[in-house]
Amino acid sequence: MELYKKVKKFVINSSKGSSTKHYERTAYWIKQLKPNADEALLIAAIAHDIERVFRDKKKTYYEIRKKKVGMTDKNFLDYHQTTSAKIIGNFLEKHNADKNLIKRVKMLVSKHEVGGNKNQNLLKDADSISFFENNLKDFLKNKLKIFGKQKIRQKFDWMYDRITSRKAKQIAKKWYEKAIKELEES
């Protein structure tokens, strides 16, 4: 797990003081959902959203597009997943990680929003749980002003509805219901 520690440090240092709780809790939820998770899955969990850290939030086309069509736009999600996979893949290559591990991490991260195989779905589920556990305050306080209630509700519904496993859905349900209630009251 030495490589995982290096990746975690990279994510934290790259975040430049921004909270990394969502990343860390995604890894935590992977361990809860799959106690024998391998290092590649844990690395994918801690680094799945690394593109966000390097994104130029004021200039990028994808941010503009996101505001127009919502946060679940297929083109935006494809860009986010692919770029995150590329960034973490490059980091792992620079640290001489095993080629098979790099390939596996990139495969996992490249589908963490939409899922696909069993482990991509697991990462997606852990990401959703962590989203509801850690991001509600930011969405209801900051993003609501930018995107409006309808797009925030779409994001909340999408994050919950995409959960594949029954166990993950049960874990996320209380936070999802709280999110909807607080959104309706805002």
Image: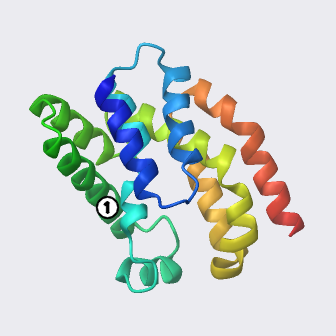
Determine if residue 114 is in view: no
* x and y, in percent, of residue 174 in the image: 77, 38
Q: Which amino acid does label 1 sit on?
A: Asp
Q: Give the residue displayed 66% in from the left and 67% down from the top.
A: 152
User: Which quadrant: the C terminus?
Assistant: bottom right
Residue that badge 1 annotates = 78
For the residue pair 35 and 115, the one nearer the viewer reads as 35
Number of other residues with Cα within 10 Å of mark 1, as a class: few under 14, some 14 to 19, many 20 or more: some
Residue 151, relative to residue 61: is it above or below?
Answer: above
Q: Where is residue 67 in the image (x, y as percent from the top left)?
A: 52, 81
Residue placed at 33% from the left, 69% from the top? Answer: 75
Q: Please name the residue shown 33% across and 55% down the image.
A: 81
Query: Is 42 drawn above or below residue 10 in the view shown?
Result: above
Question: In the rendered view, does 8 fall on the left or right side of 95?
Answer: right
Tell me if I can see residue 20 in this picture.
yes
Residue 95: where, in percent of width, then height? Answer: 17, 40
Q: Is residue 98 above or below residue 73?
A: above
Quarter of the view holding residue 2: top left
Number of marks in the image?
1
In this rendering, position of residue 95 left or right of residue 157: left
Please tell me which residue lies in front, 136 or 98: 98
Label 1 element class: helix
